[in-house]
Image (cartoon, helix red, strand yellow):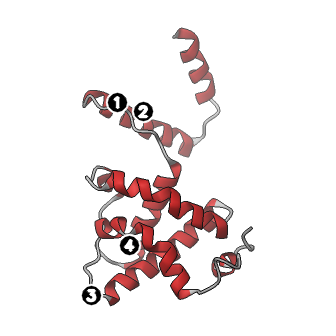
Amino acid sequence: MKKEMAKITELMKSLDGPELDELEKRVKAAKQFKKEGKSTPKYDPDVDLVLESLVGTMSRLGVEYTPAVALKKAEMFPSFAEKVPGLMKFVRKGAGSKNQQRVLLGLGFRLLYTSMTEFGWPTSSRLMMAHVHRVPSVINRNFPGYASAGLLGLLIGGELGD
């Protein structure tokens, strides 16, 4: 155990401010789960990226939203997390870098919000989480043929996807 701790301490010396903040968040989450007798959930950066994009979009739209930390504690979070890999498969086809992925997700969430309000549905962070699987379809409906032709990169000002 001492050897492992020495390795961890040595690795921590190379971390910068944001990386140390992220490490601190993960350690606190692990401690909390241990206190509650739960197993530590597997960290998934894609889930965080999608959730942060959702919350950020709601904020930029000026509508009421629930912070990401609270959404992660919601009963529906596991269902949301199960939908993320399919969404990210679609997003990665059109956006290579993380920044491009954020932009494409933001566009998708704005289109989903618009679609939901057109139907007269109430919009909330939780309802958007429940409908996250619809993001590819609202993008395809608004930009027919772009995804299948590999042109989603044009929508976000990046290079063309694969």
CA gap, disc 3 to disc 2?
A: 42 Å
Locate residue 3 relative to residue 112 in the image: left or right: right
- Between 67 and 133, the one nearer to me in the picture: 133
Position in image of residue 73 (x %, y %): 28, 49
Residue at the disc numbered 3: 120
Neighbour tally class for label 4: few under 14, some 14-19, many 20 plus, Cα within 10 Å: many
Residue located at (53% from left, 87% from top): 142
Locate residue 34 relative to residue 101 in the image: left or right: left
* Tag 2: amino acid: Val
Q: Are marks 3 and 2 in contact (CB under 8 Å)?
A: no
For marks 3 and 4, the one nearer the N-term is 4
Asked if residue 60 is positioned above or below residue 74 in the image, the reply reads below
CA gap, disc 4 to disc 1?
A: 30 Å
For marks 1 and 3, the one nearer the N-term is 1
- Local SS, label 4: helix
* Tag 4: amino acid: Met
